Image (cartoon, grey):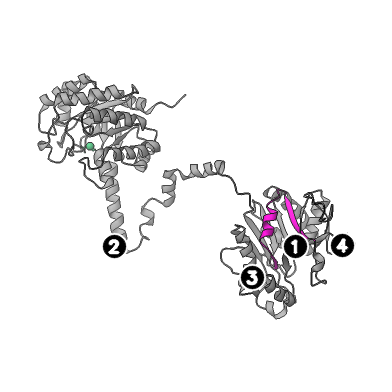
Amino acid sequence: MPEQKKTQKFRDLLNSPNLEFLIEAHNGISAKIAEETGFKGLWAGGLAISAQYGVRDNNEASWTQVLETLEFMADATSIPIMLDGDTGYGNFNNVRRLVNKLEQRDVAAVCIEDKVYPKTNSFIDGNKQELADIDEFCSRIKAGKDAQTDDDFSIITRVEAFIAGWGLTEALKRAEAYHQAGSDGILIHSALTEPIEILAFKKEWANRSPVIIVPTKYYSTPTKIFSEAGFSIAIWANHMIRSSIASMQETAKAIYKDSSITKLEDQIASVNEVFRLQGVSELLEAEEMYLPKSDLTQKAIILAASRGSAMSTLTETKPKSMVKIKDKSILEHITDVYNQHGIKDITVVRGYKKESVDLPQLDYVDNDNFSTSSELVSFNLALKNKDEDFFVSFGDVLFKPYLLKLFDEFNDDIVISVDTQWQNSANKNRAADYVRCNEPHSRDSYSHEIFLDQCGEDLREDEIHGEWMGVARFSKEIIPELSKILAGLESRDDFNKLKFHHLFQHLTDLGIKVRVIYTTGHWLDIDSLDDVVEASNFL
Ligand code: SPV
Ligand code: MG
């Protein structure tokens, strides 16, 4: 069933056999709070709206500024709003334009009072207030009713005779004239502290049309009296603005006095409550649905648990990854490269002298068995809780940033980069992860479809197509399977000795494709003191 229009909802309140209630709201958030508390309708009060702007209730806020406020209130809620339209902001012509603008903004009703523009609040020297000429006021009502395009829009007319010091006879005469002019209900206002005037009016008026009251001054009257008298609606006309004023005054005073916000924190709404009222969660869901997702990998793991004893005294107090090259540790150089690719979320696995690995902005995972374990143990530790695509590389491998871009051009679950110029390496004796693929790199025929066949440290020289650089990317889709495979390897006696080349070979043997990107140089594995010297040239 389509949601009932707000104008119909207001009509239901107006014609309900029970006493109904509107509460004042003066902006989007107060309107929302009122609705979620359970109120079925809102009074967009002139006093409250002018007060929240910090101006007087004398039409100092322009009517279009009031409209703006209403728009926020209507957008924030699904209950009907009756605007306190003051005098209608002018004559019949202003009223009909107002009615159209209110309909456009989904405001269900307007109440206009029989005074002259600019109005004054009824509780300020009411006796001195000039009432509108009856016929002229009726022309405002008629023009408003003629202007509305939705039959259910309501125009309530407010009789200010009591406020201005006239008696019941004047009030009834005016109410009857407004009723005849097409008004949908009467708001009878009184500034007395007892409900004498309004009860007298209701008794005489009977049920000619619904009657609305504003018990601001006769607030101590039990609500039962209003319902027994058959009033249609009671308006709690200014209690949201007054409570917020009291609360803001207390808060400002306390903060000013203490020059601190500590004591207050638990007494005011949390920032999360503000977010909830603003509907932040809906936006987060919408972003998930509509915003294009970055297709760049957002996370990285750097394995930096081992000492690097080949560097002798350089790694006495810190692991190799913290050795400085050109004023920055190797780890900083590596994180710089990831940062340049837009990756902020970096997990570092540390082990040897872990307390010395303390760069800010990184997440750390500790491999405390670093001295007896190898690459896959560290990798397995870092893989826990990963659920997005990620790069993994070593804490002693430098590489150029463009390589990460190459990786992100492929959608494969596992991608590794393989240096075809592996023979250029200065240190021929180091352990290297040699690779053989389905086809070798060829300058003549450039193939995109290169996958791993074999990976190991002891491939025959004539079988080698290149050397794995120590950088790989895994997709989030492969993580569950990868975790399972690692758990399987974990149960092997030699798990502590296993390296990445074992994993890649194992994956290939299982029929899982490992995509290879052939590259030429542009990386450096720092194992020895000589490599440290070379690294400063590389950078
Ligand atoms: C308002 O709330 O702005 C009203 C009611 O018009 S009263 O302030 O009582 O006049
Ligand atoms: Mg008002």
- Dot 1 or dot 3, earlier in sequence: 3
Element under label 2?
helix
Q: Pointers 3 and 4 in contact (CB under 8 A)?
A: no
Q: Pointers 4 and 1 in contact (CB under 8 A)?
A: no
Task: Determine crowd level at label 3: few under 14, some 14-19, many 20+ residues with C-alpha closer than 10 A.
Answer: many
Q: Position of residue 64 (x, y in %)?
A: 30, 38
Q: Pointers 2 and 1 in contact (CB under 8 A)?
A: no
Asked if residue 210 can be seen in this view, the reply is no
- Dot 2 or dot 1, earlier in sequence: 2
Closer-to-camera residue (235/425): 425
> Is residue 124 placed above or below 379 in the rendered structure?
above
User: Circle 2 sits on which residue?
Assistant: 257
Q: Where are the magenta residues, as a range?
A: 396-420
Q: Residue at x 80, y 59 (%)?
A: 502
Question: What is the three-letter code of the residue carrying label 1?
Answer: Met
Closer mark to the observer between disc 3 and disc 4: 4
Q: Position of residue 536 (x, y in %)?
A: 67, 73
Which label was assigned to residue 459?
A: 4
Q: Is residue 55 left or right of residue 381?
A: left
User: Circle 3 sits on which residue?
Assistant: 354
Question: What is the three-letter code of the residue carrying label 2?
Answer: Lys
Q: Quadrant of residue 524?
A: bottom right
Question: What is the three-letter code of the residue carrying label 4?
Answer: Leu
- Dot 4 or dot 2, earlier in sequence: 2
Asked if residue 28 can be seen in this view, the reply is yes
Task: Determine crowd level at label 2: few under 14, some 14-19, many 20+ residues with C-alpha closer than 10 A.
Answer: few
User: Circle 1 sits on which residue?
Assistant: 469
- Dot 4 or dot 1, earlier in sequence: 4
- Calculate the distance from the C-alpha at mark 2 to the C-alpha at mark 1: 62 Å
> Is residue 398 placed above or below 82 in the rendered structure?
below
